[in-house]
Image (tube, grey):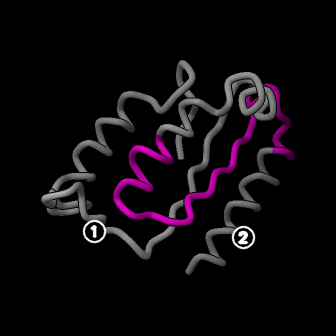
Amino acid sequence: MFPLWLGTVPALAKAFLEQVIRPGVAFSYETYGAKKLLAGRSAHIVVTLGMLAWLYRTLYCGHGIRGLRRNVFKFVGFSPVRTTMFGMIENSSEATKSRWLGMMRKDGAKAR
């Protein structure tokens, strides 16, 4: 879960992933490519945006999120990789934010 920053994942989140997604932990080098050591797991990317979520998906084709999904999570074997985007976060009412949190709690409870 992270806020969209300049169209992609914030630097601190990228730094965290660089430390966690390491050879021998998340993947291993093979003669003809990489072995996915986290295969059989799923991931759910949750992003907050200052703009409308549909606009980011349509106008920018979800560029930053698409790269994260493909180049990090799918590379190490996560599948499926789902994405939820909450847009216009600054202008959203407390009731809307509370509803979003409820959706995420419910989704998290299903994942257990």
Marks 2/1 in contact by CB < 8 Å: the verdict is no
Marker disc for residue 37: 1
Queried whether the magenta region covers residue 89, the answer comes back as yes
Marker disc for residue 70: none
Q: Which image quadrant is residue 71 in? A: top left
Q: Which residue is mark 2?
A: 106
- For the point 81% across and 34% down, which residue is it? 54
In the image, residue 12 sits, relative to residue 112, either above or below, namely above
Q: Which image quadrant is residue 34 in? A: bottom left
Q: Nearer the viewer, residue 30 or 60?
A: 30
- For the point 47% across and 41% down, which residue is it? 68
Residue 33 spot, x, y in % from top left: 23, 55
Q: Residue furthest top?
A: 6
Residue 92 spot, x, y in % from top left: 82, 33
Q: Which image quadrant is residue 23 in? A: bottom left
Q: Nearer the viewer, residue 71 or 31?
A: 31
- For the point 26% across and 42% down, which residue is it? 18
Q: Nearer the viewer, residue 35 or 59?
A: 35
Instruction: Please give the range of residues in magenta.
Output: 68-96
Amino acid identity at mark 1: Leu
92 displayed left or right of 73: right
Q: Nearer the viewer, residue 11 or 102?
A: 11
* SS type, badge 1: loop
Which of discs 2 and 1 lies nearer the camera? The answer is 1
